[in-house]
Amino acid sequence: MKYRHTEEAKNKIRLANIGRKHTSETKQKLSLIRKGQHHTKESKLKISNTLKGRPLSTENKRKIGLANKGKKKPIGFGEKVSLFRKGKPSSFKGKHHTEESRRRFSLSHGGTGISHEFEEYPFEFDLIRPTILKRDNHTCQFCFKFGNHVHHKDHDKNNNEPSNLLTLCCSCNSKEVNVWTKNKKVNHVNINN
Ligand SMILES: [Zn+2]
């Protein structure tokens, strides 16, 4: 059977320990004893309550970052962050992507590394887009299923001539981009404009 301190004895120990600092030796002993021990839910809660509002030192933050490295974020973490961030101004506001970060974005999204690849379409394209969809009857010109993507045949977003534009479905549009990425010319469907 384990020996347990009575409440009174515990109190005495507490009082005796107040203000006392652990020597590095006892600290080491304590850490050995604690190794493998887990905090109960209750004690975790207590710890988190005591720590709440306390600013972390940079050193602590670095340690936490290291400890978290490689750990998967729990499901729903992203939503929590986005909820938390809601209403707060984006830290990116007013800043611009550099050429280099654009290039990396393109590469990480399966693109070619051309920095302008994922850039927004010009205003002109927004104007002509509905006309092209109407012309092609919202039909993918590759597979003839429903399509609502307007594709630039020559991949030049600034060439918004109707003859350069083509309605594609989502799937054909992504295939087309993949083929383009591999630098293979696609035989475009001929449309009589
Ligand atoms: Zn299609």
Image: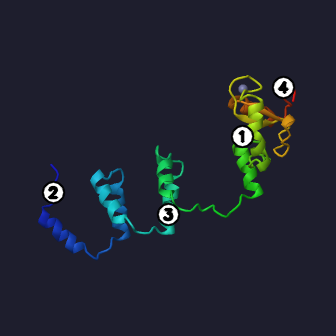
Q: Is mark 1 within 8 Å of ligand 1?
A: no
- 25 to the left or right of 164: left
* Mark 4 crowdedness (10 Å alpha carbons): few <14, some 14-19, many ≥20: few
- 37 to the left or right of 134: left
Residue type pointed to by label 1 = Gly
Which quarter of the figure is the C terminus placed in?
Answer: top right
Identify which residue, 30 or 75, lies in the foreground.
75
Residue 163 on image: x %, y %: 86, 34
The CA distance from mark 4 to mark 1 is: 25 Å
Residue 153 on image: x %, y %: 83, 35
Kindly report which numbered mark, 4 or 3, lies closer to the viewer in this rendering. 4
The CA distance from mark 4 to mark 3 is: 57 Å
Kindly report which numbered mark, 1 or 2, lies closer to the viewer in this rendering. 1
The numbered dot on residue 159 is: none
The CA distance from mark 3 to mark 1 is: 33 Å
Kindly report which numbered mark, 2 or 4, lies closer to the viewer in this rendering. 4
Residue type pointed to by label 2 = Arg
For the point 63% across and 62% down, the residue is 93
**Quarter of image, res 8:** bottom left
The numbered dot on residue 110 is: 1
**Quarter of image, res 154:** top right
Q: Which residue is mark 4?
A: 189
Q: Which residue is mark 3?
A: 61
